[in-house]
Image: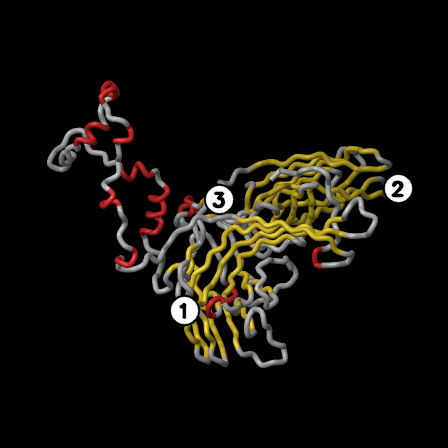
């Protein structure tokens, strides 16, 4: 079951995000209580105004590419409010924050380095008047009681990094916030930040059996001695949550007096966070063992073949592999083997080896089942952003995407018209060229006869090219597509030791620039 995260924020109108990976609540609504953003009420005073965001699906709500999200903004008030508009904002934010040991200072100070990347930030008005660049907005009154305002959002067919809160100080979140603006630029009220989990759609490739081979060593007194060889045959390279597969494992001890005592394996998920700074790189690694299983072992003389090692991947805590600006996640199958040697004086050696595997959330059979799955784009190569639309509609207008693609095409293509070479009843002859067009499209051999370039113009007369008056339009366009703009904000500050314990222990700044990803 998916879990949404609700993060408490102070009533001030600050928009900075401080990662708090350990605060999680099973709630799909967010609210704020207070009079204004600048004047918070005391906790003992009875609530007067409350703004709450509700997403359809309750605890199971999850964002995916090409999915429509619907919800409501509820305003509960015990007094009359005056507001110009009620708007809701949706944004995707990746945050990398770490405490770094400050070198070269006599005092014991630490520095908190933070980089916040906003993938997108969009908003819409669910009630009130649109903002104007040339006039002060009017305002209306909201009577005491409970009021609901619907909204709908279409997420683009783009794979963004999934929601995550590990390792410590690193997070990727998709956040909803509602704002009730005060009259004439007066302070307003905001809701809590509601975090809804997002999962990309990543398909496993066609199953390709492969073989992993390695040599295991034992270490004693700084000496490295070969102990055994292992060979594991896997049915595929990438697997999906809740999938069962078998591994053919073969272990051969090199020494004749060694027997295999026990075999076990576990699935390890690795979170690797990276923070690139001007003075170097900060790394934070977090490993989580998701499952661990013992494999039955019979008597052997140092050689053992286990043809059917069952691996049952869980459905919980197994998210797809991915790489973002500051975080990457990958998986290992770790096999742990106990070797017993000696007859009179027995000794035991524990060694392990790691098999890399990939995790997707859809099997290869879904390529033909999920609509527009092969059209999904990567967020690093696509600038499409989520878009709000009229909640009374089932989906955004069908010509919305088409108009977008047309607007991004070459402008010259829209003004050119092609005709068949031989006109007939179905394809009438093209219209005759005007005098200016005949002059313009002359062969290059007649270039000397062409008039100066200043006299040539492809535009119609000024009177015909003027757009219609804005107020003469039947209705104002409701959908305006804007390209996604990423924003990055960097901050740094010195702090005393033991400040911000939620960021963990201070890290050492490595004096090299790690640009691997």
The disc at residue 344 is 2
Measured from the top left, where is residue 452 in percent x and y? 27, 26
Disc nearer the start of the sequence (2/3): 2
Q: Please give left or right for residue 91 compared with residue 449 in the image.
A: right
Q: Position of residue 185 (x, y in %)?
A: 49, 66
Quadrant (top left/top right/bottom left/bottom right) for the N terminus: bottom right
Does label 1 or label 3 sit earlier along the sequence? 1
Tell which of 186 and 78 is nearer to you: 186
Give coordinates of residue 257: x percent, y percent: 81, 36
Q: Residue at x 59, y 61 (%)?
A: 14
Number of residues whose C-alpha sits closer than 10 Å to that of mark 1, classed few (under 14), some (14–19) or many (20 or more): some
Q: Nearer the viewer, residue 314 or 62?
A: 62
Q: How far is the residue under mark 2 from the one under mark 1?
A: 94 Å
What's the CA distance linking mark 1 and mark 3? Answer: 42 Å
For the residues labelled 2 and 1, say whether their Cβ atoms are less than 8 Å apart: no
**Can you say whether 257 is above or below 239 in the image?**
above
Q: Which residue in the rendered view is the most extreme toward the left?
A: 425
Give the x, y percent position of residue 369: 40, 49
- Residue found at x 23% / y 20%: 446
Q: Is residue 242 something that shows in the picture? A: no
Return the residue nearer the eye: 261 or 443: 443
Q: Give neighbour class at mark 3: few <14, some 14-19, many 20+ (Cα, 10 Å).
A: some
Q: Closer to us: mark 2 or mark 3?
A: 3
| Image mark for residue 138 | 1
**Mark 3: which secondary structure?**
strand
Tag 1's secondary structure? loop
Pick out the residue farthest to the top: 445
Mark 2–mark 3 Cα distance, whole angstroms, equals: 62 Å
Q: Nearer the viewer, mark 1 or mark 3?
A: 1
Q: Which residue is mark 3?
A: 378
Mark 2 or 1: the one toward you: 1
């Amino acid at each position: 079951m998916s879990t949404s995260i609700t993060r408490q924020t102070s009533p001030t109108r600050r928009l900075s995000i401080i990662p708090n990976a350990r605060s999680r609540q099973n709630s799909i609504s967010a609210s704020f209580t207070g009079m204004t953003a600048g004047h918070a009420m005391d906790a003992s005073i009875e609530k007067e105004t409350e703004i709450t965001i509700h997403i359809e699906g309750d605890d199971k709500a999850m964002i995916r590419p090409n999915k429509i999200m619907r919800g409501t903004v509820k305003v509960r008030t015990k007094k009359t409010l005056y507001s110009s508009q009620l708007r809701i904002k949706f944004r995707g934010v990746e945050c990398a924050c770490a405490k770094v040991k400050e070198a070269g200072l006599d005092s014991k100070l630490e520095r908190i380095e933070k980089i916040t990347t906003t993938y997108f930030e969009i908003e819409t008005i669910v009630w009130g008047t649109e903002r104007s660049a040339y006039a002060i907005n009017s305002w209306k009154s909201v009577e005491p009681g409970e009021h609901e305002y619907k909204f709908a959002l279409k997420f683009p067919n783009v794979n963004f990094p999934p929601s995550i809160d590990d390792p410590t100080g690193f997070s990727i979140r998709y956040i909803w916030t509602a704002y009730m603006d005060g009259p004439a630029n007066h302070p307003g009220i905001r809701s809590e930040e509601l975090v809804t989990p997002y999962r990309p759609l990543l398909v496993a490739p066609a199953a390709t059996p492969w073989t992993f081979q390695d040599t295991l060593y034992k270490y004693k007194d700084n000496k490295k001695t070969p102990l055994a060889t292992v060979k594991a045959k896997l049915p595929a390279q990438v697997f999906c949550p809740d999938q069962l597969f078998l591994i053919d494992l073969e272990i051969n001890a090199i020494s004749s007096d060694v027997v295999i005592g026990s075999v076990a394996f576990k699935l390890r998920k690795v979170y690797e966070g990276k923070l690139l700074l001007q003075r170097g790189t900060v790394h934070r690694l977090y490993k989580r063992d998701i499952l661990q299983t013992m494999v039955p072992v019979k008597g052997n003389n140092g050689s053992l073949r286990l043809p059917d090692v069952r691996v049952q991947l869980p459905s919980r805590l197994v998210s797809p592999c991915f790489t973002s600006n500051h975080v990457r996640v990958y998986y290992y199958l770790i096999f742990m083997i106990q070797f017993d040697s000696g007859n009179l004086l027995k000794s035991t050696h524990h060694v392990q080896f790691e098999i890399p595997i990939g995790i997707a959330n859809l099997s290869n059979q879904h390529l033909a089942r999920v609509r527009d799955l092969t059209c999904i784009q990567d967020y690093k190569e696509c600038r499409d952003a989520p878009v709000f639309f009229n909640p009374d509609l089932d989906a955004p207008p069908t010509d919305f995407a088409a108009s977008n693609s047309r607007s991004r095409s070459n402008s010259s293509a829209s003004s050119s018209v092609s005709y068949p070479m031989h006109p007939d009843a179905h394809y009438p002859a093209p219209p005759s060229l005007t005098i200016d067009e005949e002059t313009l499209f002359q062969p290059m051999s007649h270039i000397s006869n062409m008039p100066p370039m200043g006299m040539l113009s492809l535009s119609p007369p000024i009177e015909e090219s003027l757009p219609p008056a804005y107020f003469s339009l039947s209705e104002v366009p409701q959908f305006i597509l804007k390209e996604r703009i990423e924003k990055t904000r960097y901050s740094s500050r010195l702090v005393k030791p033991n400040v911000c314990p939620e960021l963990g222990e201070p890290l050492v700044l490595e004096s090299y620039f790690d640009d691997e990803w």
